[in-house]
Amino acid sequence: MPSQPVVLIPGDGIGPEVTEAVLHVLDAAGADIAWQRHQAGLAALDAGLDVLPAQTLDAIRDVGVALKGPCTTPVGKGFSSINVQLRKTLNLYAAVRPVRCLDGVATRFDDVDLIVVRENTEGLYSGVENEITPGVVTSLKVATEIGCTRIARWAFEYARRRGRRKITVFHKANIMKLTDGLFLRCAESMHDEFADIEFESMIIDAGCMKLVQDPTRFDMLLLENLYGDVVSDLCAGLVGGLGVVPGANLGAEQAVFEAVHGSAPDIAGKGLANPLALLMTAVMMLNHLADRLHDDAHRACGARVRDAYNRALAEGMLTRDLGGSLDTTDFARAVADRVE
Ligand code: ATP
């Protein structure tokens, strides 16, 4: 059997360093993948290409799966966010971010196990902003019944497939009666088809307070685009920060796996980036390949990687963001050495 092709986008900022670290561990675990390297973001511009080159999009469409580092969108030059463009162009409407405590990573709570599901294509990310008159600007929040229903269905199906018990929608339908009202209504209607899953809704401000008081009372969160962005980072903070939370952007046809964190230009090139978030993301990707191809070798490889990073963390092998002293490559080496 030929190796499974996967598009690899190293990205910008800390992207290339964490990507190399992840490749090192995946090689050690014997991942059977033929990487197809493509560019996006500043790296693409530097190579004389568009910020989101057509060949990168074509490769993802062709192969169906990509592992992506964070991309920087050049500020103030009229570019809209590359990450947002990619999600919209490929219709990757569901962002899923598992947020779990890890042994060896000290945090305020011991038993956080949350799945954040974010609608990835609508809301305030429509990119429709206008200057009405100097000093008065607007931004359009878009919610469609089709978009709200499909993310609600995705979340409930995921819950049933993965044996999750409850979905909580965070919203502000008391103020944004039409847009958030539609999001909430679509989720409520979907619950009628999934009576085995508990369902509740909360006004987002109260929900955030409850999250930081006791995250263990939540199981899955379902949020529109902007709330999902903000609450994902909040949840990352509950389990050790942006260095430990993986993510996937999923559509009907393609899947792009990327960690929650951005390109973190403040720490780029200094060996300070934690590659664990992208490594965990790669494990999600291997599980996705296993499901899609009915090939348990990818799942077994993912399990070897997961066991190896869990062993490394439990032995106190930590990067600086987690209070340790290892740099990006030291940590990757420590994990690779523990692959069994
Ligand atoms: P974006 O808007 O692209 O999502 P952001 O504003 O959320 O980006 P990030 O780039 O994600 O910002 O990073 C925020 C801060 O968190 C960084 O400045 C960095 O200090 C820290 N950080 C992010 N990712 C990591 C990582 N993998 N390892 C260590 N620190 C990180």
Image (spheres, rainbow, N blue to C red):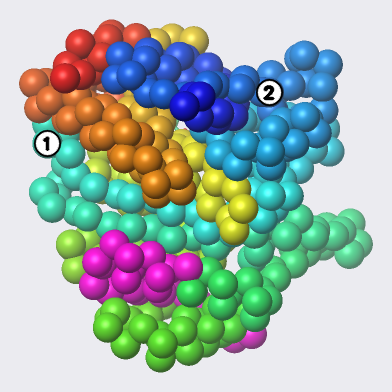
Residue at coordinates 43% horizontally, 54% vertically from top-left? 96
Crowding near pointer 1: few (<14 within 10 Å), some, many (20+)?
some
Establish if 257 lies above or below 265: below
Residue at coordinates 37% horizontally, 23% vertically from top-left? 31
Which numbered tag is attached to residue 59? none
User: As rendered, which of 315 and 324 lies closer to the eye?
Assistant: 315
The answer to whether mark 1 is within 8 Å of ligand 1 is: no
User: As rendered, which of 56 and 114 lies closer to the eye?
Assistant: 56
Q: Secondary structure at mark 1?
A: loop
Could you tell me if the residues under marks 1 and 2 are in contact, i.e. CB atoms within 8 Å? no
Which numbered tag is attached to residue 39? 2
Relative horizontal placement of residue 150, taking residue 90 as reference (left or right): left
Residue pushed farthest front?
1
Residue 270 on the magenta segment: no
> In x, y percent, where is residue 83?
64, 41
Q: Secondary structure at mark 2?
A: loop
> In x, y percent, where is residue 26?
36, 20
Report the magenta residues as a range: 154-178
Q: Quadrant of the C terminus?
A: top left
Residue at coordinates 68% horizontally, 38% vertically from top-left? 62
Establish if 178 lies above or below 249: below
